[in-house]
Every structure is written in C-alpha cells, then in structure tokens.
Image (cartoon, rainbow, N blue to C red):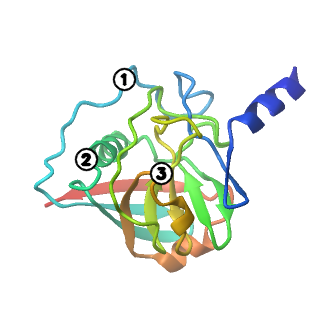
Amino acid sequence: MRLARIVARSFSRSLVAGVAVTACASTGSSGGGSAPAYPAAPAMTIDTSKTYSATMVTSRGTIELSLDAKAAPITVNNFVFLARDGYYDGLTFHRVEPGFVIQGGDPDGDGSGGPGYQIPDEASGLPHVDGALAMAKSAAPNSAGSQFYITLGPQAELDGRYTVFGAVTAGKEVARLIQVGDAITSVTITEQ
C-alpha cells in the first residue's frame, strides 16, 4: 500500500525544466496538517483598485511581497483570504531547489495538500523574474489551491504555465536562505 501511495504521489508531479514541481492539486481536504479545510474557494472580497502587499515572517527572516490584484485578481483574493485567516501561519517550506524556487503553503508539508478547493488559472502576463511569487499546481489546469512558490532567479520557461501574482520587494536574501522545513511564522496583508 505504501508503494502505491509513493507511485501515485510521483504521478502528481509535473516536470518543469528538468526539475519536478510539486503538485498542488487538492483532494478536497487539507489532509493531516494543522491548517483548516474550506468547502469552497473564497468569495471575491478584494478591491482591485487598491494595492496589496504581504509581509511573510519566516524562521529565517522577513520577506516583503507585492501582490498584483489587477493582473491576477482571483489568485490575489485567494492568497489574501488564506493569509488573513491565518492559514499559512505555522506551515513550512516543503520544497527548496537552489537557483530555482522555494515552495510552501502545503498543510501536509509534503507537496500533496491544499485548502480543500482549487482556483482557476489566470493569465496574469507577469513574468517569472527573480523573486516572482506564483501559485504551484499540478499539470492539470485550474488545480492551484494554497501552495505558492518564490523564484530564486529568472525562470522564463515557467511563463504562461503558472499564475504569477506578485513579487518579492524586500528579503530576496532571506528567500535564498530558506531550507526545507523552515517555518512560515505569519503572513500579514496590507491594503492601501
């Protein structure tokens, strides 16, 4: 049975630029983690005429993020909802690929969990520059949920395949220090 789970999990990964990107497909619950499961994606509550930013405090330091509500309103709304609800608080970075990405937001801590729902992909038009903030997902369309990643260098080969919805504005050096298992202490949203 354990082997079947391992094989199934490996099929839930997609290969991007020769590196496995952990899937974010939700199974309808948040799994065994401490974060709650939700019955559906959040209602649209952000105002796209406002500016949103996030302060992510990690066990390695603070990362400041700008969120582009005009380019990716559904994705920003989702991230803002989860952050304001404390969903990310205490979760870890489960994936670190030096020079590529750091990935977190999985309540199971292994790349298989999510918030209990999925959101549609958005063609934000934002590129995967150094420090891009984007949603992780499986190879299936519209399969993102709570998992996000931050690029550790430009990753143009990912453009158009994943929804970029923001960027690191301060703390890139902190992002580069992140190791597997490092905690997300809190994510605080600012709206202006």
Q: Which one is earlier in the sequence, the residue at label 3 or at label 2?
A: 2
What element does badge 2 sit on?
Answer: helix
Residue 169 appears at what percent x and percent y?
36, 75
Can you say which quadrant of the picture contains the N terminus?
Answer: top right
Query: Residue 187's spot in the image, x, y percent?
Result: 39, 54
Q: Which residue is mark 1?
A: 40
Q: Residues within 10 Å of mark 3 (few under 14, many from 20)?
A: many
Of labels 1 and 2, the one closer to you = 2
Report how far apart the C-alphas of labels 1 and 3 lie in the structure: 21 Å
Q: Mark 2: which amino acid?
A: Pro
Measured along the vertical axis of the image, is residue 39 above or below residue 154?
above
Residue nearer the viewer, 190 or 130: 130
Mark 3 or mark 2, whichever is nearer to me: 3
Q: Residues within 10 Å of mark 2 (few under 14, many from 20)?
A: many
Q: Nearer the viewer, residue 114 or 21?
A: 21
Whichever of callouts 1 and 3 sits on the residue coming sooner in the sequence is 1
Horizontal relation, residue 166 to residue 98: left or right: left
Q: Residue at x 49, y 35 (%)?
A: 143
Disc 3 target residue:
162
The residue tagged with tag 1: helix, strand or loop?
loop
x, y percentage for residue 126? Answer: 36, 63
Q: CA distance from mark 1 to mark 2?
A: 17 Å
